[in-house]
Amino acid sequence: MEGNLLLISAFCPATISSLVFLWGVASFLSGSMLLWGMVAAVPIVIHLLNRRRRRTVTWPAMQFLLVALQQRTRSVQIWQLLLLLARVLAVLLIAAALAHPVLQQPPPLVTVDPRLHLLVIDSSFSMRASGASGRSRFTAALEAADRYCRQANSGDRFLLVTMQRNPQVLIERPSIDIQAVREVIAQLEPSYTGASLNDTLSLLHGLLEQATLDEPEVVFFTDMQRRLWQPACEGTATAAWQRLIQRCRAVQVVDVATRDPLSQPNDRILSIQAVSQERVAIEMEFATVSPEGKKLEVRLDDSVIETPVVARGTSGRVVVDVSLPPRRDIATITATLPKDSLGVDNQRYLVVRPPISSQIVCLGAGTNTRFVVASLQVGADRPWEVRTMTTQQWLNLPEQQQQADLLVLCDVSDCPPALVQTFARLPAVLWWLGPAARPTGFADQAIPFRLEAIQDPGLYAIDPLGYQHPTVSSFQPFPESGLLSTPIFRYWRISPKSDWGEGTTALALQSDSGNHPLLRLWQRGSQRLAVVTTIPMAAATGDEPAWNAMVAWPSLVPLSQELATWLLASSHAESEYLVGDRIVGQMKDESGEPPEVRTPSGTLMDVTIQRNRQTPGQSQTPAGVDSADDVTMSGRIWAAGLAPEPGIYQVQFTDGRKGPVAVNVDASEGDLQTVDDDCLKVFNAVRDSPEASSRFTGVEATAPGRLPESDSMGALFRWLLAGAIAMLVIESLISRFALRWQVATF
C-alpha cells in the first residue's frame, strides 16, 4: 500500500502541490462555492461500495489462475486508485475555480510606512435604492469599504464617518485593529434622512484638526447623488472640498452605483396637503410613462377610502385631490404607491383634525375689503366666519383678542412693527396688493417679499403654470371659468426675500408678459403666507386707473375661496415632522408629566421638559393634542428625541389624552439623478504619493502588495479550469486503456 501512495504522489505532484499552495496564498470571493468540493466524495463512496460487493467464490476450474491474479492485483489497484484520484481532483479543481480565488502576492521588499485612512460612507436614504442585482447601494458600499480594509497594509490606521442629516463619527481615534473596523462597518444601517456635503466636510475638517494626525487618505463610498454632490462642483461646498484635498494625501470618491443600475425607475410621493376639511391634495412624481397607470392607495386610519389610478400616460409631477369622508375624531391618512427600486419615498403620512369653524379677519378700508369679503361669504356651507376691521382697530385690541386663523390685508399702505409682530402668532396671512401699498412699509424681515414697482398699464393674461398648485388645480377641468380670461391691467412687481429664513415657496399664477408673479405662496413650519399682486377693483378710483376686472368675472369667488382654503389647511392638519426632527409639544399645565412617545416600530422615546422659546413663524399646535384650546400657554414644552424613522408616532398623556403624529422622509432625497460627468473630474485627487497613486488607480481601491482582482481572478480561474479538464482526460484514458489492458492480460 505504501508503494501505491508513493506512486500516486509521483504521478501528480504538481496538482496536489498547486492545491496546497492555492489554499495558503489565495482568498476566495465566493467561498460558498467550495462546498461543491464535497461532490468529490461521490467517486470515493462508489469505489468503497464496489470493493464491498466483491466475494470469494471457490471454483476448482479457476484455481490455476490464482497465481496470475495475485501477481497483477497490485498493478490493478494502483490504476484504480489513480482513476479515483483523477475523478476527485477534477471535482475539487472545478469547485475551486467557481469560488473565484484571488492570488495574493508576497509583500513587497520595500518597507511601506503605515497610512491613515479616513473612510466616509454615505448612509442617506437614497442609498437604500436597489440595483438590477437585487442588492442595495448601501450594501455595495459596505462591501467596497470592507474590501478596502482587507487590502490595507499592516500597521495602517482607520477613522470612520457616516454621511446623513447629522453626520456621525463612528471611529474618532485612529484604530489599528482592522478586524474591529470591519465589524463596525458590517453593523451599519442606512438612515431615513438625506445628507449634507457641507455638514460632512465641516465635520471632517474638525476631526482632522482636533489632533495632529498624519495626512490621511480619504475615501467616500456613495451613489453620487446630484443633490448631495453638486455643491462640490459649483456651489457652497467647492472651497471646503478644495481645502480637504490640500489637507489630505489623497481623496477618492467611489461610485457604488455606476456598475449596478436601478432595478426600476423611482416614483415618489412629494407631499400630502390638507386643502380643506373635506379633501387633501397628494403630489407625486413619476419617472416614466405608464400606459396602464399606477394605483395610489389612500387609507383613512385602517380603511381604504380611495385607490385612484394615476400616471396613465403621464410622467413628471401629478397632483391628485382626494375627498375625505365625514369624521368626528382626529384621523391619520396614509398614501401608498407600488414599491419600486426605492420604497422609502413611496409612502407618506398626514394627521388631520376634526372639522372646525375657522375665523377670517380682513383688514383695510371698506372700499378695499368689500369685494374680497363678498367672495369669501358666498355659499351657505362655507367653513369659516369672516369679520372686517381697519388696521388701527386690530392694533387697539388686547393681544389675547388678536386671534384669527387667517388674516387678510386688503391694499394696506404699510405693515407697522406692531402689526408685523402679530404675524408670528397667526397660522396664515394673505396680502392683496393695490395702489395704496408703499415699498418702505413692507421692508420688515417677517414679510417674505419686497415691493419693486407697479407694472405699467396694459392688458395682461394669467398663466396658471400647468395648474400644479392646489390653489388653482380645481380650475383645470373648467377652462371657461374665467381664470384665464380675467383682464389684468396693473399689478405689483415683487421679489422674494432671499434672507427671509427657512421655508418653501411656490408660484401659482404669473403674468404671461414678463413672467411676473400674480400669486405666490410660502410655507414655514405650519404657517402659510400668500400674496396676490393685484386687488379686485370695480373701476378707476380718482386718478388711479382700474387694476383688473375680477369683480365682473366668475373666477374671483372660486379663486378667493380656494386660496383661503389652502391657507387655512394648517388648522385642519397636525404639524408634519421629518425624520431627524425633534418632536415637541406644549404642556397642559406647569405640574404636568411628559407624555409617552412611541415610534411606529414600538420603541419608547426619551422625553424631557424645557422652557418654550418660541420663534417667529412657530405657530403649530402641540403634537398629540386635538386643538390649541386644550392647552394653556404655560411656556413649558415637552420634547422627544430625534425621530428615527417615518410613520405614525403615538403620543400618550398621563391624563388619558392621546393622539398620532406623522413623520415623513424628505422627499427631495428621492431624486436619484447623479452628478454630471464633467463634475466627476474635481473629486478624485492624489498629491505627492506614488503609493496613493497606485492605490487609487480604479473605481475600487487596490492596495499595494496585491494584484488587481480582475487579473488574478481570470488567471487562476483559467488554470484551475484547465487542470480540471486535464484530470477528466486522464480519467478517461485510464478507464478506457489502462484498466482494459490489465483485464485483457489476465
Image (spheres, grey):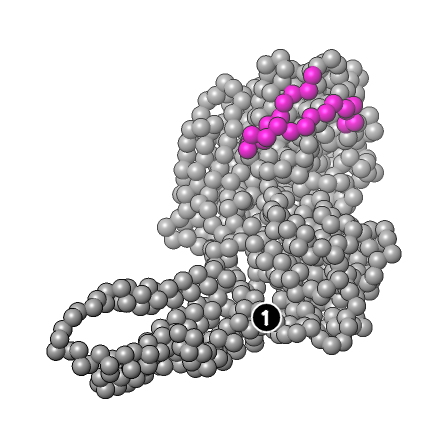
Is 648 left or right of 605, judged from the image as shown? left
Q: Is residue 269 magenta?
A: no
Q: Is residue 612 magenta?
A: yes
Secondary structure, magenta segment, majority class: loop
- For residue 554, above or below residue 3: above
Q: Which residue is mark 1?
A: 25
- Neighbourhood count class around disc 1 (C-alpha, 10 Å): few under 14, some 14–19, many 20 upward: few
Q: Which residues are magenta?
A: 593-614
**Towards the viewer: 742 or 347:** 742
- Residue 419 position within the rendered picture, expressed as x and y whole percent measured from the top left: 79, 26
- Residue 9 position within the rendered picture, expressed as x and y whole percent measured from the top left: 46, 78
- Residue 40 position within the rendered picture, expressed as x and y whole percent measured from the top left: 38, 66
- For residue 661, above or below residue 730: above
**Towards the viewer: 419 or 193:** 193
Residue farthest right in this picture: 212
Dot 1 lies on which element?
A: helix
- For residue 139, above or below residue 25: above
Is 424 left or right of 669, judged from the image as shown? right
- Residue 6 position within the rendered picture, expressed as x and y whole percent measured from the top left: 45, 78
Count up the numbered dots. Answer: 1
Q: Tell me the quarter of the picture where residue 526 sits.
A: top right
In percent of the image, x 48 and y 79: which residue is there? 13
What amino acid type is highlighted by mark number 1? Val
In percent of the image, x 67 and y 30: which residue is there? 583
Q: Tell me the quarter of the picture where residue 112 sits.
A: bottom right
* Quadrant of the image containing the N terminus: bottom left
**Towards the viewer: 166 or 423:** 166
Q: Is residue 736 visible?
A: no
In percent of the image, x 23 and y 65: which residue is there? 53
* Quadrant of the image containing the C terminus: bottom left
